[in-house]
Image (spheres, helix red, strand yellow):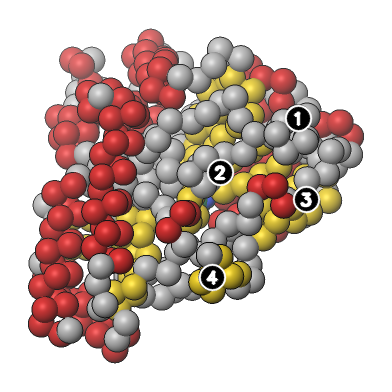
Amino acid sequence: RPWNFSAGPSALPLEVLQQAAAEMTDWHGCGMSVMEMSHRGKQFMQIAQEAQADLRELLAVPDDYSVMFMQGGATAENAILPLNLMGRGGALKADYVLSGIWSNKSHKEAQRYGDAAVAASSGAAAVIDGVTQDPWTWFPEPEQWRIRADAAYLHLCGNETIGGVEFATWPDMATLGVPNVPLVVDASSHFLSRPIDFSKAALVYAGAQKNAGPAGVTMVLARRDLIGHALPACPSAFDYANVDGANSMFNTPPTYAMYIAGLVFKWIKRQGGVAALEKANIAKSQALYAYLDGSDFYLARVHPKVRSRMNAPFFLRDESLNGEFLAQAESAGLMQLKGHKSVGGMRASIYNALPMEGVQALISFMQEFERRHG
Ligand code: PLP
């Protein structure tokens, strides 16, 4: 199989695909595909319960957090979130940290429901350690964020998939002087790539299609005191109280996507859990960035302190070679390296399912391309 560097939907572990293929028409001898099962039947109930329990175990989700499987992707969650949380306390206010395209989208969506303010933004160039950083390639220091004490929550995007910037640690709201403002994180593109510190995050949501399975299921891990405050306009299928109360079976859940996500969770356990994957992700991303930094031919623009372990945007200094680079990469079995149109250049997404061998194949190809054109 070629190495797939897609930002999402992205590569899944081959073992998972093979298992799903083997079970496609007959799941565990029951004579049905998982696709054909009632979500209330005992077979699917078992699949769903195991998926939920495995996810809890992998991320050490505390008991007072709900683990919900929803639909609509992170984009829908950008609306579902304010619809559920903004009314808490009655102020209809929420604060947003803008660090790239995805957090901007979240903020824009929230403005439909109340007073969504900007707590901080990296949307201007900044001089850091004497070097000028382009917009969206750095993070404002949390100590400088303007967080309102009566905000219903503070939202940030843990990993900006397009810009390739990632929060290495999440801020402690008590240290920032707002202990009663819950931190909410869109973790879509680094979910399950590293542990989650639930002492800092009150709600984490993630679409599955990067590290956790196919598109179609969104995971929402929410501290229970945040549940039960939905605005009257919130659709009943998106009210966390309904979803949590029915253990993600308020209406038909995305059964097949949940099943595959469950297989991915078991695969992660076999790899040694999230800590083992984090170690691998550190090694993979360090290898790639070390190569980029050591080269005069390629360029990584994101500030080293906030570079994403999952999505590495990079540029050829001679951009006229972009087309040739992509065509030759594809012939060499290195797929989907084109950068997002808003950033340009290239982007290598190196999620959990892409092993070090794939990163090394990319680096070898880049070295060879540089040797021929440099
Ligand atoms: N947030 C982040 C960080 C993403 O990477 C994406 C999609 O790539 C989204 C939100 C939107 O997800 P979806 O297309 O599933 O709604």
Q: Is residue 217 left or right of residue 126?
A: left
Residue count near mark 2 (Cα–Cα under 10 Å), binned few <14, some 14–19, many ≥20: many
Most distant residue in the bottom direction: 320
Q: Secondary structure at mark 4?
A: loop
User: Of label 2 and label 1, which has the lower sequence position?
Assistant: 1
Q: Is residue 372 left or right of residue 285?
A: left
Task: State the CA–CA distance, disc 4 to disc 3.
Answer: 25 Å
Task: State the CA–CA distance, disc 1 to disc 3.
Answer: 14 Å
Indicate the amino acid at tag 4: Gly
Q: Secondary structure at mark 3?
A: loop
- The residue that label 3 is drawn on is 146
User: Of label 4 and label 2, which has the lower sequence position?
Assistant: 4
Most distant residue in the right direction: 90
Indicate the amino acid at tag 1: Pro
Task: State the CA–CA distance, disc 4 to disc 1.
Answer: 34 Å
Dot in front, 4 or 3: 4
Q: Which of 167/6 is in front?
A: 167
- The residue that label 1 is drawn on is 179
Dot in front, 3 or 2: 3
Indicate the amino acid at tag 3: Arg
- The residue that label 4 is drawn on is 130
Q: Which residue does the image show at 23% across and 28% down from the upper left?
A: 271
Q: Which residue does the image show at 45% across and 19% down from the upper left?
A: 60
